Image: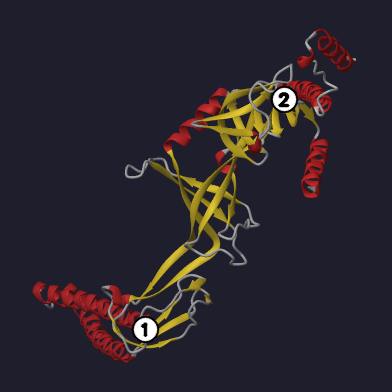
């Protein structure tokens, strides 16, 4: 209609003007075509402008982001603490020589179990056999002197009573007898000493345990003093100790929590412990705490403690570093959140809370220690509040979100993956 009106107006204008200026749209070969194209362009531009307004309105109002939320609840959780410890034998004995001499033989297998009383080394016994024979000879001489002194005493006593001998002769005879008795006792002790030294030439295991490598080889001169007297070491593996230390601050925090009623503590004698080995496996036998020092080490500021474990199968060896988990008691009315719900924001830790309008509100929180079910929240959350567990990447502060179940979120993620794969 606009086009016909425009054509008619041009025709009327052509009729009113001079003959030289009577040129209408029909008289121009391309006039009508150009006019039609301009009108079409205007119409398309208007349509595109309308579409742009619709797209802008869609960007300004995006759909709510689906997220998985959880409700803050109070619960009682087992309270544990983790320490680094080092294993040590229940007993560690240095086997040393008690006599000097040449080491003739090692009679045990290095690195294998030995029993108490088992022969381990043999030191040359010949010099000590000779010393024993000499001591026995001296004892025989002293026995003979004692017999004579005893006879002299028996003879002089009745003579002295009849006043046949003088007081001086009597006193001398009695003194000789007592000296002979003393010499005889000393000679007997020398025999016993020589016999002991001879027995010490065979070095035996004082306890049952695992024998270490021999410190001396056959043919070495062994002396009782110095390092040459050390022959080997025996360690008793069952039971086994785990030594560790804890800080004074940890002790004070624990005691304060118990006084406030936050922790229902076990008796210190019933604290169960578990250890994790270097390969990540957990030792099957549980131990218990059996020692805690009553003083703080001034050099390290820590308190020494020890746990004991059964080691009948010999899986644990002295000197291993292990991670200990000690069961301290029960944390009462605790708030626990999964680690994936905690967001790092510079120096703060935050949890994304959902308000009544399903808007995201970042909430700074104070973290406690980690437990099996998650991380303890000491402050920042209240019971009944909702927080985001999954979908944190798209949940910006102030944005409106749509709480969904974990199954629904899994289905949404799977659909998005399939769409991306299709493209």
Residue 123's place in the image compared with 259, above or below, is: below
359 relative to 120 in the view: left or right: right
Mark number for residue 59? 2
Q: Which residue is mark 1?
A: 201
Local packing at callout 1 (Cα closer than 10 Å; few below 14, some 14-19, many 20+) is many
Residue 100: x, y in percent? 28, 82
The answer to which of marks 2 and 1 sits earlier in the sequence is 2
Q: How many marks?
A: 2
Residue 302 image point, x, y percent: 40, 42
Q: Is residue 291 left or right of residue 178?
A: right
In this view, which residue lies farthest toward the top? 16
Q: Quadrant of the N terminus?
A: top right
For the point 43% across and 40% down, the residue is 247
Q: Is residue 263 visible?
A: no
Q: Quadrant of residue 130?
A: bottom left
The percent position of residue 69, horizontal first and vertical second, equals 74, 29
Above or below residue 73? Residue 412 is below
Q: Nearer the viewer, residue 305 or 167?
A: 305
Which residue: 83% across, 40% down? 411
**What secondary structure is found at the residue carrying circle 1?**
loop
Q: Is residue 391 above or below residue 56?
A: below
Residue 202 position by quadrant = bottom left
**Residue 25, x across and y down, in percent:** 83, 20
Colour scheme of this structure image? secondary structure
Work out whether residue 37 or residue 151 is closer to the camera in this orientation and state it: 37
Residue lying at 50% horizontally and 32% vertically, measured from the top left? 346
Q: CA distance from mark 2 to mark 1?
A: 96 Å
Pointers 2 and 1 in contact (C-beta within 8 Å): no
Of labels 2 and 1, the one closer to you? 2
Left or right: 385 in relation to 365: right
Left or right, residue 374 beside residue 227: right
Q: Secondary structure at mark 2?
A: helix
């Amino acid at each position: 209609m606009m086009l016909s009106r425009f054509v008619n107006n041009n025709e009327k204008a052509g009729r009113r003007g001079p003959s030289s200026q009577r040129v209408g749209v029909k008289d121009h070969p391309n006039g009508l075509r150009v006019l039609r194209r301009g009108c079409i362009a205007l119409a398309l531009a208007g349509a595109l402008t309308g579409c742009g307004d619709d797209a802008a309105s869609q960007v300004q109002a995006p759909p709510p982001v689906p997220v998985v939320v959880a409700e803050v609840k109070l619960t009682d959780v087992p309270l544990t603490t983790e320490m680094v410890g080092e294993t040590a034998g229940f007993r560690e004995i240095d086997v040393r020589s008690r006599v000097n001499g040449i080491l003739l033989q090692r009679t045990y297998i290095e690195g294998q179990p030995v029993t108490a009383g088992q022969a381990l080394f043999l030191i040359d016994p010949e010099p000590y056999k000779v010393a024993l024979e000499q001591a026995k000879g001296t004892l025989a001489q002293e026995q003979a002197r004692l017999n004579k002194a005893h006879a002299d005493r028996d003879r002089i006593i009745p003579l002295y009573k009849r006043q046949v001998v003088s007081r001086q002769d009597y006193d001398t005879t009695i003194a000789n007898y007592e000296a002979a008795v003393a010499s005889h006792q000393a000679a007997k002790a020398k025999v016993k000493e020589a016999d002991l030294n001879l027995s010490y030439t065979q070095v035996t295991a004082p306890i049952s345990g695992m024998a270490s490598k021999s410190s001396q080889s056959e043919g070495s001169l062994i002396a009782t003093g110095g390092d040459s007297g050390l022959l080997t070491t025996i360690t008793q593996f069952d039971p086994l100790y785990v030594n560790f230390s804890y800080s004074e601050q940890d002790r004070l925090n624990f005691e304060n929590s118990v006084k406030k009623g936050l922790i229902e503590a076990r008796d210190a004698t019933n604290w169960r412990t578990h250890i994790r080995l270097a390969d990540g496996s957990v030792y099957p036998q549980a131990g218990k705490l059996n020692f805690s020092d009553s003083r703080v080490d001034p050099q390290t500021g820590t308190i020494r403690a020890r746990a004991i474990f059964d080691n009948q199968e010999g899986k644990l060896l002295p000197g291993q570093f292990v991670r200990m988990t000690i069961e301290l008691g029960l944390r009462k009315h605790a708030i626990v959140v999964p680690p994936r719900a905690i967001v790092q924001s510079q120096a703060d830790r935050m949890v994304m809370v959902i308000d009544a309008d399903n808007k995201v509100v970042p909430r700074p929180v104070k973290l406690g220690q980690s437990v099996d079910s998650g991380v303890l929240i000491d402050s920042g959350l209240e019971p009944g509040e909702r927080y985001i567990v999954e979908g944190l990447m798209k949940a910006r502060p102030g944005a409106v979100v749509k709480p969904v179940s974990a199954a629904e979120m899994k289905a949404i993620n799977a659909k998005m993956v399939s769409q991306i794969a299709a493209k």
